[in-house]
Amino acid sequence: MAAAAKTGSAASTGLAFAIGFIPYLLLSLPAGAWADRLSRSKMMIWADIGRVALMSTLPVAFFISGETPVLLLFAVQAGLSAFAALFDAAYGAYLPLIVDKDKLGSANSAMQSGTSLSQILGPVLGGAFVSWFGGSEVLMLTAATYLISIVSIMKVRRSERQQTRTAQKRRLLTEIGEGFAYVWNHKLIRTTGIFSMLANLVIPATYVALLYKLQRELHVASDVTGYVLASWSAGMVAGGLVYGRIKALLSLKQLLVAVLVLWMIPPAVLAATSHTGLIAAAYGLSGFAVSVWNIALITLRQTSVAPDIMGRAMTSIRLVAWCSLPVGNIVGGAVTQAQGTTAVFAIDVAVRIAMLLLSAFMFKQMNQPAANEDEPAQPLKPAS
């Protein structure tokens, strides 16, 4: 948003987002290895300190030169992305160390609700603050949130349990390879990764098709389109808030099946109706299903992965799962252009059906006894 306010260029804004995404991808895997080597809480604190330091360069530059250079904004965006990779890798491996296994679902649902709520309020507050204070000043307000994060981490009373890694130093690439090998050889975790890849293929495709339908087919006003798209985040918040109650009524298998069945409804409604209210309700229901699904799957991984390889395993899964996101955007746009939005929504339903059928294999693996968490990661083997 600061780049848009500074340059007034959509191309420059898009470039800023791209610059911000590349360092995250490049550092994700090394960050996972570092999270298994180092204190995860300290790694998060240093990542936040780095983000505060980066943002502090903006008012300093403005004080010296009277303006904030665009190149500095891009550099700060890239640096923030790099520190975010470090923080996320440490956080994903830190939570299971300080939260009991039976409380992980509640912890993840609380985090999901907070993240989704920020996605609703962030653009609204960001736009207002940019108009009131200016783009660079808004980033300084964001720096205050990282300071709050630092204090919150330091206030955690439960000590970080000692990790079981050996003291022997090894090459970084070797440790990263162990993360991929662990995910590949762990049948249950590998299956959840396939689920995430499939979901991340159709979610952006459906978003592209829905945006096209609202703007080009139904000619909905831009502000109304924004409200419809925001229903997704509202559904995500609702899913996080009620996850605990749903989990108390259903077993994990029943919950996953229910979500997959529920997930088929939104794309069918999106294809069948032109009523804006129904479209918003369906899209919100899809966000609700994604939220509950994500919490269940993340919790399943955190309770199944060995603690000493948690950082590398979680970042490996994240990187593999996110590879399908740009593919989904491309496929969604191409199919929409060639066949229309209904074809994209039909593909979405078909993928959900495939996931429901695939869930039988995951449930079979969930019934098998867990592997010994003290065993080291095994070398990568070809699929049998």
Image (cartoon, rainbow, N blue to C red):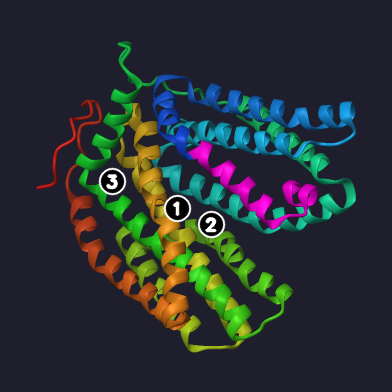
Which region of the structure is painted magenta? 1-24
What label sits on residue 163 in the rendered view? none
Name the residue: 55% across, 21% down.
42
Q: Amino acid at mark 2?
A: Gly
What label sits on residue 240 in the rendered view? 2
Name the residue: 76% across, 28% down.
57
138 or 25, which is in the foreground? 25
Q: Which residue is mark 3?
A: 189
Secondary structure, mark 2, is: helix
Sequence order check, earlier mark of 2 and 3: 3
Secondary structure, mark 1, is: helix
Relative height, residue 338 to residue 173 (above, below): below
- Magenta stretch: helix, strand or loop mostly: helix
Name the residue: 24% across, 26% down.
374
- The residue carrying pointer 1 sits among few (fewer than 14), some (14 to 19) or many (20 or more) residues within 10 Å by Cα, namely many
Instruction: Name which quarter of the figure residue 113 lies in.
Output: bottom right
Q: Which residue is mark 1?
A: 295
Is there a contact, CB below 8 Å, between mark 2 and mark 1? yes
Relative height, residue 359 to residue 379 (above, below): below
Residue 296 position, x and y percent, is 40, 54
Sequence order check, earlier mark of 1 and 3: 3
Q: Amino acid at mark 1?
A: Ile
Count of marks overlaid on the render:
3
Give the label, 1 or 3, closer to the camera.
3
Is there a contact, CB below 8 Å, between mark 1 and mark 3? no
Q: Is 169 on the left or on the right of 136, as rendered?
A: left
